[in-house]
Amino acid sequence: MGINFQRVNYKYSYNAPLTLKEVSLEISEKNEFICILGHTGSGKSTLVQNMNALLLPTSGQITVFDKNVIKVVKHPYKLNTKKNRLKYNFIDNKKLFARGNKVIYSSHLKDLRKHIGLVFQFPEYQLFESTVLKDVMFGPKNFGLSDEEARLEAKKACTIVGLPKDVLEKSPFSLSGGQMRRVAIAGIIALNPDVIVLDEPTVGLDPKGKDELMSLLVNIQKETSKTIIMITHDMNVVGKYAKRVIVMDQGKLVFDGNKRDLFGNIERLHKFNLDLPTSANLAVKLKEKGLINYTHLPLSKEELETVILGGDINE
Amino acid sequence: MKVRFNNVNFSYDEESVVLKNFNLTINDGEMVAILGHNGSGKSTIAKIMMGLLEVSSGEIYINDKLLSQETIDECRNHMSIIFQNPDNQFVGVTVKDDIAFGLENKNLPREVMEERIHKYLKLVSMEDFIDHAPEELSGGQKQRVAIAGALALECELMIFDESTSMLDPKGTKEVNEMIKKIKKENNKTIIVITHDLEEASYADRIIVLNNGFVVADGTPKEVFKNELVLEASGLKTMESVSIIHNLKNKEYKNKSLIEEALWELTFNE
């Protein structure tokens, strides 16, 4: 179950270099809070866009919720033979189409996108409807819900992201940046996906908006146990919230594990062009001066305060 | 380069007023950071200065010259702005074209153009991408090109409108170092519009905006101490200052030394 990548390669065009190189990973369908890190151009966005088949891998195999989304074959024109039909388990040919050397299980695409909701970078630029409610309803309606059902889902989603009721009938363009982003996220939550993927959700928000959005995501996860995957550059967010960290470097997956492992090895961290969270940086310097002592490096402000007060960090 | 806002009023529509009786003077050679929550009017100020928005009432003086329909071209010659989203300002077919665009508009000789393109691309470490098309670049790379383009114009005043928000930590650091370097070597006036407190801490002076009003104006140290004003403005103070504040009423080992060290780490680096 969940998302499975096996030796996935991706390039944007025939002559382009590989943006993803032999990426293999396994993400469980519940209870994960994953931060994807990497410097600009390392393949983070490409990776998440492959997860819901907005981009299709050049080679390799991606399985989402036990459904084979895509399989790369050598001779797509031979697909229509009896043997291949059995092999790929088609009942009728409409289920699949071939693009290049890829077989795409088209009947699975919509299903897949229902499992995995993707929130783009600056999603507020994609709002378009005349009212907030209509904008949030757009997704569920596309997935075949009636107006009534879609309205219900949309209202639920707006409550989850903390939009006040009086906003629902307003134009989304009259709202502040932080609120517009909430509307965009509500549009994805209304689809009730199992996994929510966000591409740099906190960029451009003021510090308060950032905190509010992060606690919103934490709450959604606590209440629904959905897996949340987010791309971020903000080490403070990683230090405070991540349960699992994936680091991309030049298209390769170079780290997949615990944040304490990642931040524990400063040399490797710098090799990935990453930095320590602000509090960890302060902690290292205070320790150098002999003012505090710790066994686990504090990764957030709260943890550093605990250490300064002479306490220990609970794993 | 001196900029002065005198009793400026501005609103996008009749319902909401963005700036009300706004007064602000930015002095020659100063690096000013404008901090504020989303919708506080930060970017509006920059756009008004560039003549991209027209004020409802009040005057703006650029180098003691009134900004008006007649003087706008001349005033713009002294200023360049780098926006938040690099996609909105990439005009060239290649990186080189993009930087050349601004220079062509200034009627510079070819040799000077070539020289500046190379000089500033090197400064933002994008020299290897000179013949690349914008769609081959990531968001952060595009932003670095935009910064090089603005630098190449060699104006007296540069406005950075949240222009590092899409870069990774290393890129942000590089750009910030670069801003400091440019300021130091060329005596430029620099305005940095940002949410990022660390970025603001490099400035000589910080101005905090809340709903179109200036609620704080001072050196980084003065402003960051003022946690209540920052919080009321949708901002937070630096983590180190906040730690000192949070633990003020508690007893712990090495208290005064830790407090001293935290202040030092915040402002003397």
Image (cartoon, coloured by chain):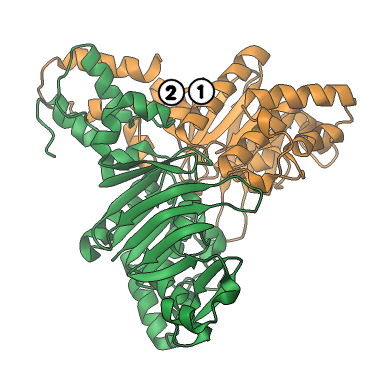
Residue highlighted by disc 1: B203
Residue highlighted by disc 2: B220
Q: Position of residue B229 (x, y in %)?
A: 37, 36
Which image quadrant for residue B28? top right
Colour displayed for chain A in the image of the structure: green
Decide: is B66 above or below B258: below
Colour displayed for chain B in the image of the structure: orange
Decide: is B254 above or below A58: above
- Give the crowd class for mark 2: few <14, some 14-19, many >=20 residues within 10 Å: many
Q: Chain of mark 1?
A: B
Residue drawn at (46%, 73%), measured in percent from left and top?
A109
Q: Position of residue B142 (x, y in %)?
A: 63, 40
Q: Are marks 1 and 2 on the same chain?
A: yes
Question: Under tag 2, what secondary structure?
Answer: helix
- Give the crowd class for mark 1: few <14, some 14-19, many >=20 residues within 10 Å: many
Decide: is B245 above or below B138: above
Q: Chain of mark 2?
A: B
Residue drawn at (31%, 63%), measured in percent from left and top?
A2
Tell me the quadrant of the picture where the N terminus of chain B can be found. top right
> Which of marks 2 and 1 precedes in the sequence?
1
